[in-house]
Amino acid sequence: MGQVIVIGAGQAGASCVARLRNSGFEGGITLIGAEPVPPYQRPPLSKAYLMGEMTRERLFLRPESFYAEQGITLRTDARVTAIDPSAQTVSMGDEVLRYDDLVLATGSEPRRLPAAIGGDLKNVFVVRDLADADAMAPHFVPDARVLIIGGGYIGLEAAAVAAKLGLRVTLVEMADRILQRVAAPQTSDYFRDLHSRHGVEIREGVGLDRLLGEGTVSGARLTDGREIGIDFAIVGVGISPATALAEAAGLGTDNGIRTDAFGRTSDPHIWAAGDCASFPWRDGRIRLESVPNAIDQGEAVAANIMGAEAEYVATPWFWSDQYDVKLQIAGLNTGYDTVVTRRGEGQTASFWYYRDGVLLAVDAMNDPRAYMIGKRLIEAGKTADPALVSDPGADLKPLMK
Ligand code: FAD
């Protein structure tokens, strides 16, 4: 059955190796991760873990003993430095390992601010790894002043934790509105309002000119000319797929490591899954940055290594927790032309995205029912009458028949 090597001990890598074993793969499996810890979940790093409501132990996807019990060689603190596709080997410095199948599950890397604008000052953080969360957590003390750069989900989640812990929070978003890249104006309005009610100062259409300070950050100059004093900064300006190894090995890339519908890259012995993979979707290609995709794609690649020849069909969904609001997103809103609002009581609301009358996606806030119904409809290729959706008194359940 041969040797499988998985590069990247994150969500996709862990799901791939577990699936290989429980599908009866009897060959050797080596899971190689650059971080010093076994695979863990990242979402709590900007939510419950940062808030101090979740222990470190609970982050781990499996107990460390699982890997040895399953005959999986887990190498932590180990970085693959090169792949040689013709020799079918990977190198970690001087050490060379041979594979029959190689899986790239290298995830993504946070974009950082250039040193020229103060990105290298002390107390400027990104939120990607457990080490990042551990480094910034001690700064979350009441009355500390934090600047959050970027109004995407991670920036907003960090803002929510900071506000709940009594920090003074300013968030700048260079675009006209927070969440502009991923959501409709209705969703942006909802979260702007939510954060304002918790005392977060959100400044949209305003970017960072530069961070200020001698060695350690102490302030920031914004693009509107304002200067503010801060104790630390969090940079949440997006991520880039980790494609450097693949590119150096001559594999095809296209906003991620290019795969076919089975997860195979341009080399027949090399596969890719998770945040780093760009795969066929409808008429084009897509790359998803979410836990559900990492899990499902990691498993799909495992099945295909075992010869399933099953196409990976993504059913995108995502979530975010901010204060007492749980946002659940079903589908992908790309190309929407209409948004229909459904309001419930209190903070309950959902926004339904359509294109040419076809339901594409649903953003549901504290409304698991709207989320579940929307998800089932989208997966079944069905739509929902906007008049019914917008009527808060209408029961949506019959739509699923
Ligand atoms: P990763 O989990 O990033 O794992 C990749 C691993 O590969 C890393 O450990 C990296 O160190 C390692 N690696 C890279 N190169 C090498 C190399 N050369 N050698 C060895 N190892 C290497 N998703 C949701 O669905 N819902 C959420 O609420 C949510 N919240 C999030 C909050 C935060 C703070 C973050 C950072 C992410 C969040 N996500 C969320 C996204 C989700 O965590 C990612 O989509 C998911 O972790 C992707 O899994 P992955 O295995 O592809 O990559």
Image: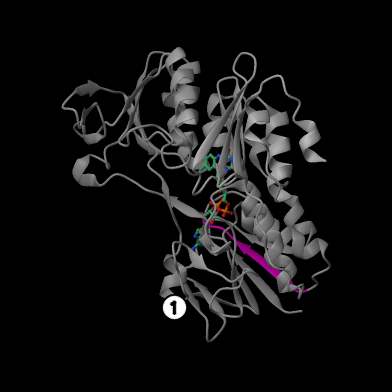
Query: Looking at the picture, does residue 1 appear above or below residue 36?
Result: below
Q: Position of residue 32 (x, y in %)?
A: 59, 62
Q: Residue at x 59, y 17 (%)?
A: 347
Instruction: Indicate whether residue 272 is drawn in magenta.
Output: no
Q: Residue at x 67, y 63 (%)?
A: 312
| Residue type (three-letter) at the residue carrying disc 1 | Gly
Magenta-drawn segment:
27-34
Q: In the drawing, does residue 254 fall left or right of residue 71? A: left
Residue 391 visible in the shown view: yes
Which residue is depicted at the point 45% across and 39% down?
A: 127
| Residue 157 in view | no
Nearer the observer, 295 or 347: 347
**Identity of the residue furthest to the bottom in this view:** 86
* Ligand 1 under 8 Å from disc 1 Cβ: no
On the rendered structure, is 105 left or right of 227?
Answer: right
Q: Does 112 sit above or below residue 235?
A: below
Position in image of residue 189 (x %, y %): 45, 25
Q: Please say if 262 is above or below 112.
A: below
Q: What secondary structure is the magenta-colored segment mainly?
A: strand
Colour convention of the picture: one colour
**Where, by quadrant of the figure, is residue 15 drawn?**
bottom right
Q: Which residue is identified by label 1?
A: 250
Secondary structure found at label 1: loop
Q: How far across and down, in percent of the image, does residue 374 sit?
A: 68, 38
Q: Which image quarter is the C terminus in?
A: top right
**Residue located 37% across and 42% down the image:** 237
Depth check: give the residue in front, 98 or 152: 152
Q: Residues within 10 Å of mark 1 (few under 14, many from 20)?
A: some
Residue 72 x, y percent position in the rendering: 72, 63
Residue 29 part of the magenta segment = yes
Quadrant in which the N terminus is drawn: bottom right
Of 16 and 303, the residue lying toward us: 303
